[in-house]
Amino acid sequence: MSVDRQSILIIDDEPRACQSLAYILNEEGYVPFSVNSGKEAIEAIADRFFNLALIDLKLPDIPGIKVLVKIKELSPDTEAVIITGHASLDTAVQAMQDGAFGYVTKPIDMDYLLAIITRALEKQKSKIERKEAEEELRKSREELRNLSAYLQSATEQERTSIAREIHDDLGQALTALKMDLSWLGKRLPGDQKSLIDKTESMSKLIDATIQTVQRLSARLRPGLLDDLGLTAAIEWQVKEFENRTGTKCELTRSRDDFPQDRDLCTAVFRIFQETLTNVARHANATNVKITLKEELDKLVLEVTDNGKGITENQISDPKSFGLIGIRERARFFNGEVKISGMQDKGSTVRVSIPAGEGQK
């Protein structure tokens, strides 16, 4: 909100006092606007923005304190200065508690009033500029989060496409090659031992290559995630992690089927993968406990290891891109991530996401 037009609302039941004050304020470069009742003041505030309101406590219809409260409710950025001919400490304290910037008594010392107005408007300008900066920062963060989500979604689509091509095209070609080699091997003369041995060796190489293709395809995008859902994909990932690292894993789940929103399931699965990657790289753990459950309409994934324990510095490290990725994936679905650890007693990553959340 711009503060270039420093408009001041004068609220006083004495028309002459309003005119005199308006004249002085106009001479000082402000834009004055006068009303003679609390009702008119509230209507004026509801209709347009004023940088500052000068409020006489004694009004014919509504007490000035109540007008002050209503003004701050309708226009929180409007500063207010109380004016009264009946000064009291209690009144001043009450006015300050209700949001007034200052307190001036009648007869008005204009130099003092102008000084208070200047300070009030400086405070307002600073406050509005801070709000604008905060809003710009919020928008920037939201744009970055949306960009991150878009890139993640595009990456998942590309992974799915590549995984499908590897599995279908290359896998089928290798299978056909193995069948042709088998056909050829059966037709070789029995006395051609070297050729027979070569075809058997080639067949084993093809089998190993097929397994590699299946493994690469699954690592890019496990078909189980799309075909059988989140639980099956996590079970597969647990077994694959155990085979690859030798770390014992215990999986507990509250049910076999969980919400099937594709983007949500993908996010939870990728969070789980990243968590296991961190365990393998940093924890030196021998046991990992995984819990997947629904709790108060939220999908909860909890991974606890018995490793050396993550430190607070590691948790807050801006270069911990894996943890940042986990938080961003969860935050995009209005989820929460809690990471904790104790030295030589392991670490826990707990992710909680509203179960009905789709992509935001």
Image (cartoon, rainbow, N blue to C red):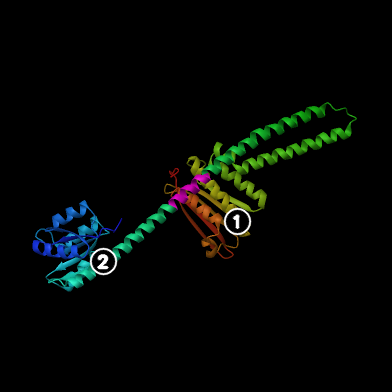
Q: Main secondary structure of the magenta part?
A: helix
The magenta segment: 141-152
Q: Where 18 falls versus 277 (above or below)?
A: below
Residue type, label 1: Val
Q: Please give the residue where the numbered disc 2 appears in the rendered image.
A: 120
**The quarter of the displayed image where residue 288 is located:** bottom right
User: If the image is split into quadrants, where does the C terminus sit?
Assistant: top left
Q: Is label 2 in contact with label 1 (beta carbons under 8 Å)?
A: no
Q: Where 215 falls versus 285 (above or below)?
A: above
**Along the viewing direction, whichever of 156 and 9 lies nearer the viewer:** 9
**The quarter of the displayed image where residue 175 is located:** top right
Query: Magenta stretch: residue 147 in it?
Result: yes
338 left or right, relative to 185:
left
Residue, far top: 187
Residue 177 visible within the image: yes
Residue type, label 2: Ala
Residue 294: x %, y % from top left: 46, 47
User: If the image is split into quadrants, where does the N terminus sit?
Assistant: bottom left
Q: Where 162 falls versus 324 (above or below)?
A: above
Query: Magenta stretch: residue 129 in it?
Result: no
For the point 59% across and 52% down, the residue is 276
Q: Separation of disc 2 and disc 1 at Cα?
A: 55 Å
48 left or right, relative to 161:
left
Residue 193: x %, y % from top left: 88, 33
360 left or right, relative to 62:
right
Q: Which mark is residue 279?
A: 1
